[in-house]
Amino acid sequence: MRKQRIQERSLIGMLITLGVVYGDIGTSPLYVMNALINDAGQLKNATPDYVIGSVSLIFWTLMLITTVKYVLIALRADNHHEGGIFALYALVRHRAKWLIFVALIGGAALLADGTLTPAVTVTSAVEGLKGLPKLGAFSQYPWLVPLTVTVILLVLFMIQGFGTAVVGRSFGLINISQAPVILKAFSPVYAVQVLFNPANKMGIFILGSVFLATTGAEALYSDMGHVGKANIDATWPFVYTTLILNYLGQGAWMLTHYQDAAWRNATNVNPFYAMVPAGGQIAMIILATAAAIIASQALITGSYTLVDEAVGLKFLPRMIIKHPSNVRSQIYIGAINWLLCLVTLGIVWLFQTSAHMEAAYGLAITLTMLMTTILLSQWIHMKGHRALALALLFGFGALETVFLTASLTKFIHGGYLTLGLTLVIFLIMVVWFFGNRRRLRYNQANEQISLLDYRNQLIQLSHDDHLPVFATNLVYLAKVDHQHRVKRSILYSILDKRPKRAKVYWFITINETNRPYDCSYSIDMLGTRNIVEVQLNLGFRKSQHINLYLRQIVTNLIADHSIDPQYSRYGITQPRQVGDFKFVVQNQQIMDLASNPTMGQFDRLLIGGRVLLQNITPSPAIWYGLAFSDVLEETIPLFTKPATDATLTNLTVHHARTPQRNSRQP
């Protein structure tokens, strides 16, 4: 049995939280202040007002967005201990149909931005080697950094299939003691002043770099199901304190060195490494690289979780999901792993330096945060707090809109890449979800018939000794509605093509529920002992392995005397009450889509795209865990109009003539 996730507060839970949940936000000091220096142009332009104001903006951004919105509010919006934008959408989706677009945009942006996080964190850590005199080659040969990062990331992605299970900022206090004036950053006055200070050439657009400090907040919410909100509540004050100490330390170092001859004309200075004493830089680089790898690991596994939820909500096509360990939260999706690997390595070689990556980083995640705010306001309104919902919507909505506007300057510097990925993922989700909706609409209009009308035929076929037994249990994965209607093609497969005689006919409907790990079923025997309609209710994070559930259901029905025991005369285990299973999976194909006058152009695009995605992703047999079962896959057409041709003309019909006897008999 899989181990349950950690939900209650404990020492081990808090340690795991520190190592997993804060990977992204905990490594942000590696590149945030560096990005702010790049905004200023040179270190000499980072005046005291600019530095104090920038650190103040970081402090209040972490306070408002990460602490208030996510830790104090979002963590309370849990879907049976699960967090993240898709889990939140599952809670509120019944309130309005348009909320699905909010969830799709937010989820697509989160997946797209996740491709940049491993690249920027590991690159920022490795670039610390440039400051070491004995390793000056890292500056002489620009390709050494991306090559080193590529090796690290390749190893990281390669070990994902085997399964996997915050660093304190101690040098901050040393530098703060040398420039205590940096403590003025706790006042929000300096945060406001720097936005309108003429010396700040970026103006309000400096917020695009400041926002990098809180990009990990969404990952924090998504990882709630792994460690529990109690452990996040207990550890966040410590993490927040260490983060602020580090930012204050970096700011203090900048205040004491921005006029030094050795530093004032420097560009691409990373105060994170510069403030560390020379004797400790190698150790800090190793520590930062390890932290960056941990952060990347958390983002990669977080992407698996997000995709798993999207597949469960029918936002994305089916994918092969493996569980490499006994931990329930540990999953591995090979297709996503290698796609992430390809895109991440492409980003490393495209941008090559963390400074260039920072220019593209964070734009897409602002979209996710804004979408989360909209869904959170709906959840709070659902709880009966209308005024609070409006305050959150307009308060955080306005704040995140400002950050989004400020981040738009990143578009031409590389933000186009993440927004392009966001658009591609969003379109795939739209085509898969709404293409399926439109496909079902045509099915329901033209192909639905009631099982009750064919009940007697199925009973007679089951007892017809003139036909060989096709299977003891013949199982169709069919969507049966509350009026017992199924697609015509299913009954045609049983009765018409070549009558399939079985002792029991099973019609299984799989319903996705709002509860992440829901697993229940209901049975309707339709007044018979050999026709079973099963409604299987599975949460959006639950395994879809139908054969495991079905064997348990059959055993229960035999024990309840609802169906007859299925004794077998032969077998290595005797007596055996459950017989063999034959699964029938029907794959739908569209016949000459363009010739259907009843289908609109938009429907053609959606349904055609959906069928294309269906054909290049794992088959239903693999998705439902039937790879080693006896499966018959049937291809059926999707008809939107009966096939007729009014131009066909009836000509003469020649009947066969009876041969006449020859009168001349010998």
Image (tube, grey):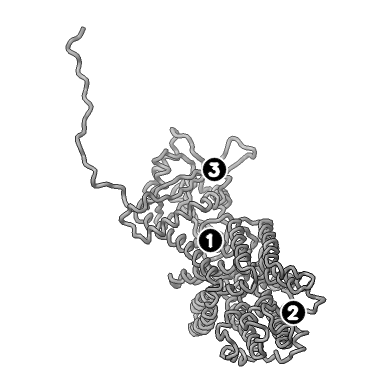
The image position of residue 453, as x and y in percent, is 36, 48
Q: Residues within 10 Å of mark 2 (few under 14, many from 20)?
A: some
Name which residue type carries label 2. Ala
**Label 2 to label 3, Cα distance in Å?**
64 Å
Res 606 quadrant in image = bottom left
Front position in the image: 389 or 42: 42
**Label 3 to label 1, Cα distance in Å?**
25 Å
Compared with 18, 615 (above or below) is above
Q: Earlier in the sequence, mark 2 or mark 1?
A: 2
Residue ID for mark 2? 274
Q: Residues within 10 Å of mark 1 (few under 14, many from 20)?
A: many
Q: Which residue in the rendered view is the most extreme toward the left?
A: 663
Name which residue type carries label 1. Gly
Residue ID for mark 1? 312
Give the mark toward the camera: 2 or 3: 2
The image position of residue 1, as x and y in percent, is 67, 57
Q: Mark 2 touching mark 3, by CB under 8 A?
A: no
Name which residue type carries label 3. Asp
Residue 509 visible from this viewpoint: yes
Horizontally, residue 368 falls left or right of residue 38, namely left
- Residue drawn at the location 58% of the way across and 83% of the way down: 206
